[in-house]
Image (cartoon, helix red, strand yellow):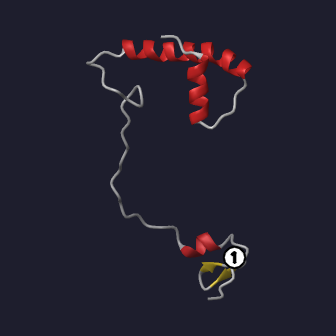
């Protein structure tokens, strides 16, 4: 079934897109080609082919959570430009008026 300019005009109206008669005449055959291509893909997919979003199965890779010793605070703070009470001192960026 070929897509007509009237079909495209109806779709454009639903999408609230203004198209001139020239644009409708030019777009109808182009959209018909696209719809035919999509229909041909649907014909290839047989009943035994499950729909997928990826060609290969994706799985998350998990690892066990292990408690490990951290770097000493003195080592981490040694290169900091400013330190206060064993913490990095940074400039205030938010007002704390509440």
Q: Dot 1 surroundings within 10 Å: few (below 14), some, or many (20 or more)?
A: few
Q: Position of residue 15 (x, y in %)?
A: 59, 36
Is 66 in front, or is 26? 26
* Residue 33, image quadrant: top right
The reply, left or right, for residue 2 in relation to residue 64 is: right
Q: What element carries label 1?
A: loop
* Residue 46, image quadrant: top left
The residue that mark 1 highlights is 90
Q: Where is residue 88 in the image (x, y as percent from the top left)?
A: 64, 76
Q: Where is residue 23 in the image (x, y as percent from the top left)?
A: 71, 21
Which residue: 27% across, 18% down? 47
Residue at the extreme left: 48
Which residue: 30% across, 25% down? 50
Quarter of the image that includes the C terminus: bottom right
Q: In this view, does 64 lie above or below 84?
A: above
Is 85 in front, or is 37? 37
Q: Where is residue 94 in the image (x, y as percent from the top left)?
A: 68, 78
Q: In this view, does 72 lie above or below 11?
A: below
Count all numbered tags in the image, as a single digit: 1
Which residue: 44% across, 15% down? 39
Is 8 in front, or is 34? 8
Q: Is residue 14 above or below residue 84?
A: above
Is 40 in front, or is 53? 40
Residue at the extreme bottom: 98
The reply, left or right, for residue 32 in relation to residue 22 is: left
């Amino acid at each position: 079934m070929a897509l007509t300019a009237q079909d495209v005009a109806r779709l454009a109206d639903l999408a609230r897109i203004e198209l001139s008669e020239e644009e409708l005449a030019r777009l109808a055959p182009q959209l018909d080609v696209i719809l035919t291509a999509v229909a041909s893909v649907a014909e290839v997919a047989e009943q035994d082919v499950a729909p997928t979003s990826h060609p290969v199965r994706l799985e998350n890779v998990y690892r066990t959570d292990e408690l490990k010793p951290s770097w000493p605070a003195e080592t981490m703070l040694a290169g900091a430009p400013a330190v206060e009470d064993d913490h990095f001192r940074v400039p205030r960026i938010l007002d704390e008026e509440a």
